[in-house]
Image (spheres, grey):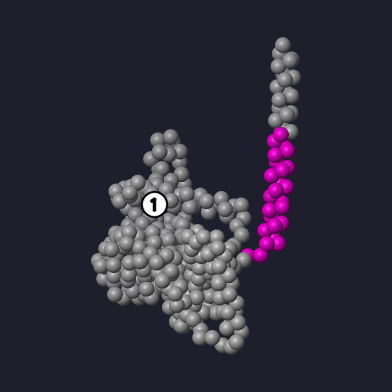
């Protein structure tokens, strides 16, 4: 009986190992193909003319409202109009329309989108003129100081070339997100967009008492008086805590100086408290210049301007996708928790 059980168990293990090996080989093959594809697939920049997008939306609605005969007639008229426009374009130089280049930045804690932003800004700088405009649709609740400082520096490149810069905020531009936004010549926000949070925060859990309770020693060796101020596992001192606060205050001072330099109309002492405001209150505090959604702004601008949406795609490794996904999930969780704590969520 025992021998029979051992035999069955051995057979089960053999089958399991065979299945596991097959899955491993399949996954390895897929990974190899994917890596090869990534090597031969160049990083791509995508440009989409939004004027055509709006025209397609309009034509689709109109077509549904017409009879079949009227629909054919309308399609014929559109083809005729396009031919006339092409003929007119070939006839000679035409009055040049203002061009608006639209970039989108959706930020996470690490401002991962800055890699694409820097390429998009470079691409736009090769063709944009001071008579044109760059619009950035910005959505970010903030994150690490150095990452968002770099993102703001990318937008400053446009300012240095005297290209008008407008930031549109539909949902949130807070903390590091507002650090980016304040660079713009104009900040336009939806009425209930979250703006502000001009402050610096850092949280460090400490497990020292838990380790002591289980008789676990933790040694932290440093060279340099302030190489470590606060630590997760060591015993924190009042001196280290004081220095850590000084460092946070210094970063906050740099943040306020940057805000004053780029948005002089704001009363720094009033807004740099770490608080946030919704669009209407932000307008009163001069944190934004106008209340309007990005859709309304771009649709209205399409009447007299050629609008181009510019997007640079960087292929990600599996590791980068994993980190990006985890960072995004953490960012969303923290933002949701923050909203609930503040009791401002509609959920």
Q: Is residue 22 above or below residue 104?
A: above
Query: Could you tell me what secondary structure mostly forms the magenta stretch?
Result: helix
Residue 291: percent from left, percent from top: 33, 67
Q: Is residue 158 above or below residue 332?
A: below
Residue 185 position by quadrant: bottom left
Q: Residue at x 57, y 83 (%)?
A: 88
Q: Residue at x 42, y 61 (%)?
A: 139
Instruction: Name the residue tied to disc 1.
Output: 335
Observer-nearest residue: 190 or 204? 190
Residue 29 in the magenta stretch? The answer is yes
Residue 182: percent from left, percent from top: 37, 70
- Whether residue 17 is visible to the viewer of this picture, yes or no, is yes
Q: Is residue 247 above or below residue 98?
A: above
Observer-nearest residue: 324 or 312? 312
Residue 297: percent from left, percent from top: 40, 69
Residue 30 in the magenta stretch? The answer is yes
Residue 24 position by quadrant: top right
Q: Residue at x 70, y 57 (%)?
A: 37
Highlighted magenta segment, given as a residue range: 19-43
Horizontal placement of 80 versus 263: left or right? Answer: right
Residue with the most extreme bottom position? 92
Residue 91: percent from left, percent from top: 60, 87
């Amino acid at each position: 009986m025992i021998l029979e059980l051992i035999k069955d168990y051995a057979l089960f293990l053999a089958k399991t190992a065979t299945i596991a090996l097959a899955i491993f080989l399949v996954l390895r093959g897929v990974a190899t193909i994917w890596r090869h594809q990534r090597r031969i697939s160049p990083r791509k920049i995508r440009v989409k003319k939004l004027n055509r997008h709006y025209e397609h939306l309009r034509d689709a609605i109109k077509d549904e409202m017409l009879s079949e005969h009227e629909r054919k007639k309308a399609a014929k008229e559109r083809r005729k109009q396009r031919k006339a426009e092409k003929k007119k374009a070939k006839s000679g130089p035409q009055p040049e329309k203002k061009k608006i280049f639209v970039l989108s930045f959706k930020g996470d804690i690490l401002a991962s989108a800055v890699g694409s932003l820097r390429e998009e800004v470079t691409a736009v700088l090769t063709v944009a003129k001071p008579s044109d405009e760059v619009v950035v649709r910005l959505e970010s609740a903030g994150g690490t100081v150095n990452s968002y400082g770099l993102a703001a520096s990318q937008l400053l490149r446009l300012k240095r070339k005297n290209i008008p810069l407008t930031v549109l905020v539909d949902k949130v531009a807070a903390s590091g997100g507002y650090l980016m936004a304040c660079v713009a010549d104009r900040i336009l926000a939806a009425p209930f967009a979250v703006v502000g949070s001009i402050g610096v925060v850092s949280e460090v859990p400490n497990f020292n008492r838990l380790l002591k309770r289980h008789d676990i020693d933790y040694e932290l060796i440093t060279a340099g008086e302030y190489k470590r101020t606060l630590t997760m596992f060591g015993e924190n001192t009042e001196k280290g805590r004081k220095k850590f606060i000084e460092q946070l205050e210094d970063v906050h001072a740099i943040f306020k100086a940057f805000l004053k330099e780029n948005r002089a109309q704001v009363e720094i002492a009033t807004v740099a408290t770490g608080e946030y405001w919704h669009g209407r209150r932000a307008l009163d505090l001069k944190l934004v210049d106008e209340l309007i959604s990005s859709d309304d702004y771009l649709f209205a601008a399409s009447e007299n301007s050629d609008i181009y949406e510019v997007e640079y795609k960087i292929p990600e490794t599996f590791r980068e996708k994993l980190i990006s996904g985890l960072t995004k999930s953490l960012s969303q969780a923290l933002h949701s928790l923050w909203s609930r704590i503040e009791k401002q969520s509609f959920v």
